Image: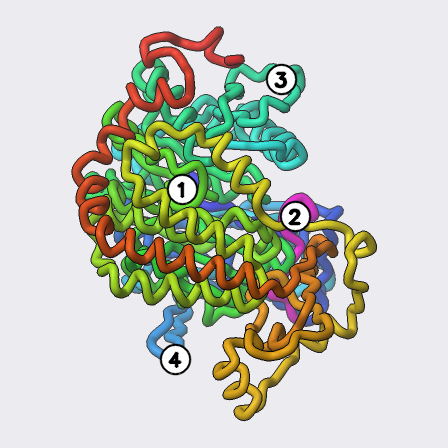
Amino acid sequence: MFKLQHIIFPSPENCTEESLFFRRNGKVIYSFADDAVTVGKYGLLSFDTYFNGFSISKWEKYTTVKQIGLSLKLQGKFRISLQYKEKQGDNMLFRVIREFYCDTAGETKDVFSIIDTDLTIGMYSFELMSLSGKSKFWGGYYYTETAPDNRNEINLFLNICTYKREKYIYRNLKMLEKYFLNCTESELYGHMEVLVTDNAKSLDLSLFQNSRIHIYRNKNTGGAGGFTRGMIECMKDRNTKNISHILMMDDDILIHPEAIYRTYSLLTFLKPEYEDSFIGGAMLRMDRQWFQTESGGSWNSGRLVSHKSGLDLRSLDCCLYNEVEESCDFNAWWYCAMPMKFIRTDNLPLPLFIRGDDVEYGLRNMKHLILMNGICVWHEPFEFKYSSSMFYYIFRNRLIDNAIHSQPYPKKEFLKEFREQFQREVFTLRYKNAHLLLDGINDFLKGIDWLAEQDGERLNQTIMDRGYKLQPTETLSVPFSYPAYEATLHFCESKIKRLIRILTLNGFFQKASGSVIVPTIDPHIAHLHKAEYALNYDAASRKGFVTYRNRKEELKLYHEYRKMKKNVITRYDSVRKEYAERYPEITNLEFWNHYLEISSLTDNSETGDRNE
């Protein structure tokens, strides 16, 4: 017997949003401190949820598993209902597969049942109703009796890149030790190792003496360089440790160990025709743990589409919608497992430092992406991480990725979209961001040789130094008022004021006066109409920065914009062609060894555990 998926409960360790795990009605008591749910007479527990529904559509399509069973650990008298649910347009198909009664006579017993049905497009789930005064449910699992010779041998390496995120790294490594690396009862015991690339060289190595945790101190070359270093180290051990898959994972995430287990169980039974599949984890918000930010994505020439964004996963309808597959180009590397066969000396990521390296690698290599309810991570929303430096990378990396994959992005279309972003930063008085946008384009036009020669850390530091810095509001020259900030969030512009704003270039030809308080993320241009100062407030950190209207600076920016535009007209097509033809020069092992300043592939690190 092989356990495919465990029935799990909410926990302060990872997620406390109860309705992601079960729904209850009547006399049902659950406490984080207990290992069981206590159910009073006629109390009802339903498990048609994000974490405990069984995605039969994915198991049927992608794996060799033919028969599914359910094991439940119970004490008391229950009516057990095995159910099937499927989304059909705006409606839901519901079927009871089997219903039966169970009386454990006061003892705690494991109750097994085969789920026998031809319905395989949606979700299996179950429902428990207590028929006695005080029954208990201790959990359980879905399983299969598939023979061992029909299973794939999976050895999974987790590849984590970090930079000064010690709190997250220590917590996640301790979790991995507890549930997998040191747990002899786990199916993954002996089949998983963890590799951490420490770009800041700040981790305390003495805290981890586990032979299955390998920490490498790396030159800071951003996420791209950190993940690539992990890939290179995995290639060294590919044969000796029979590595089958590598799991790319962010350092600042919260993850339930069951997500990793389900990834492993899926890989164990993948059909041969899907052996090249990537398995992706959805991103859920850390603050609203039921809110799905993305489950797979499409590149769309750089106009990224986050699939199934905004779903409330407490809803059964949203969970069933998650089962519906869509075409995806990539899965972000906050959680993405891929076959080791793709990690080759001639097929490494681009040296982009940050933003877009995972997307490009997916465009280059991903054939199938398997997504499943319950395989996810929690991550801080990106709007909680304001950084001016992103404006440098936004268009630069987008242009590089489009060029390499010959994605249609005519220069006229690019210039139109760039102008909109550029003007937004100018009109919101964020002149530093506008300069960074221009610099990103000018650097792209310098071609692939320029990119290959860059010291990514030094370049990124220069970019960060030139951007806006968040500071405590009490140190700023514009007084902070929360009611004034809230008022901008509910702003409504009249048609007449909008017309005046457009005709005056957002107040460029009018006398400026007064100050406003605006959010750092996507402030409306109208907020800054005729404003002389702006306090840009970041609600997540409760910090901000001040910008000032400067007409000379605006004129200078437009002069630089016209120069950039002329350069695009003459160089755009040739640079795109250059990247498309020569990108293998910067995605091979020889380049990366030089870029990261590390030894060749044939040289193993000391003991395979630490590398200074």
The residue where tag 1 is placed is 336
The residue where tag 2 is placed is 469
Residue 606 counted in the magenta span: no
Secondary structure beneath disc 4? strand
Secondary structure beneath disc 1? strand
**Quadrant for the N terminus in the image:** top left
Q: In this view, does 385 lie above or below 463?
A: below
| Whole-percent x, y for residue 236 in the image | 35, 16
- Density class for disc 3 (Cα within 10 Å; few <14, some 14-19, many ≥20) is some
- Which image quadrant is residue 507 in? bottom right
* Left or right side of 55 for 568: left
Q: Distance between the residues labelled 2 and 1?
A: 32 Å
Of residue 308 and residue 527, the one placed in the foreground of this image is 527
For the magenta stretch, what is the residue range? 12-25
Residues at marks 4 and 3 touching, judged by CB atoms closer than 8 Å = no
The residue where tag 3 is placed is 205
Residues at marks 2 and 1 touching, judged by CB atoms closer than 8 Å = no
* Left or right side of 576 for 609: right
Which residue is found at the position 62% from the left and 61% from the top? 520
Q: Distance between the residues labelled 3 and 1?
A: 26 Å
Residue 91 numbered tag: 4
Which residue is found at the position 55% from the left and 57% from the top? 431
Residues at marks 3 and 2 touching, judged by CB atoms closer than 8 Å = no
Which residue is found at the position 25% from the left and 41% from the top? 365
Q: What residue type is labelled 4?
A: Asn
Q: Which of marks 4 and 2 is nearer the N terminus?
A: 4
Of residue 210 and residue 233, the one placed in the foreground of this image is 233
Of residue 556 and residue 56, the one placed in the foreground of this image is 556
